[in-house]
Image (tube, rainbow, N blue to C red):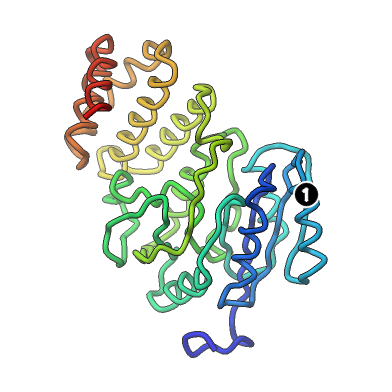
Amino acid sequence: MIGGISKLEQDMISVIVPVYNTEKYLSDCIDSLLKQTYQNLELILVDDGSTDHSGRICDEYSLKDERIKAIHKKNEGVSSARNLGLQNCNGKYIAFVDSDDFVTKNYLELLYQNLLNYKADISICNSSFTRYKCKSGIVDCDNQLNYCKYIFLYYTWGKLFSKQLLENIYFDTDLTIGEDSYFIAQLLKRSKYIYYDSTIAYIYRQNPTSLTHTDNSAYWNTALLAWDRISQLYEEGSIAYWSAKLTYMKRFRQIVNVDRKVIGRYQKEFQKNKKSIFFVRESLKEKILILFLAYFPNMYFKVYQIFKRS
């Protein structure tokens, strides 16, 4: 019995796990999901052409537990893997977990109960990565939504969605970084409000081999494309619009820190969107760095190093 709901009455939750060369962490991830207090689930492991033993591990688990489905495909990226999972899931609700992470035993129960109790469109929990200090509560999904404040909206993990909400929305396979953010943004446009729980129930593992740790500026360029698309979802001049633009510029800073040769490519765009620092609450440090990058790029790196050491 969970929160007055018997096991027979529980809705099925589909947990989609894209898998690529994570043999070192995969068993921890799967075991944490099998030990959930919420048991009416199906676990869809999508092996995206792994070259290590990850695919074999998926098969071994699928033979042990009938709730597990192992799918193998050629390597096309995490977005393609998640999309295939969406096409093969049967649950009324859907959650995404990365294969190098794991969750607490009440992860699904917490998300499910909050979704029902608060009649939210999306249920979200805190993670060991964000350690977000915002209090638990309802967040409206309107033009005042501040992406810079709610950084947990950048990722698909740590969330529970109704399958109905996801209808005809898939991950953009052209985006290598930022695909999570754009996917979530499209769902937010369909939502009235979300519920955020400050409980840390998703344990994010800092995997040095993941794409988010790459120094390839070409990968990071797709994050700019994603946040530009997100800004276009909102009324120009709204908080949601400007916070998406500000996040765009913060991502650009990350690219410049990797490859300073790209500064000239986006300089005019950067200057055009500088207004966002006046409309969106952000740290003074970030605002100063953005202004230097926009107008004094040669001095930006000196200022950046000063802030980095402080």
Q: Nearer the viewer, residue 77 or 86?
A: 77
Residue 245 vertical placement versus 121 (above, below) = above
Image quadrant assignment for residue 282: top left
At 73% from the left and 59% from the top, the residue drawn is 88
Q: Classify the position of the N terminus by image quarter.
A: bottom right
Provide residue 45's location: percent of width, then percent of height: 71, 56
> Label 1 is placed on what type of residue?
Gly
Label 1 neighbour load within 10 Å: few <14, some 14-19, many 20+: many
Residue 104 vertical placement versus 302 (above, below) = below
Q: Classify the position of the C terminus by image quarter.
A: top left
At 47% from the left and 32% from the top, the residue drawn is 223
At 32% from the left and 15% from the top, the residue drawn is 268
Left or right of residue 211: residue 127: left
Residue 1 vertical placement versus 115 (above, below) = below
Left or right of residue 109: residue 288: left
Provide residue 273's location: percent of width, then percent of height: 28, 27
Image quadrant assignment for residue 246: top left
Which secondary structure lies at badge 1? helix
Provide residue 299's location: percent of width, then percent of height: 23, 12
At 37% from the left and 66% from the top, the residue drawn is 199
Question: Which residue matches tag 1?
Answer: 55
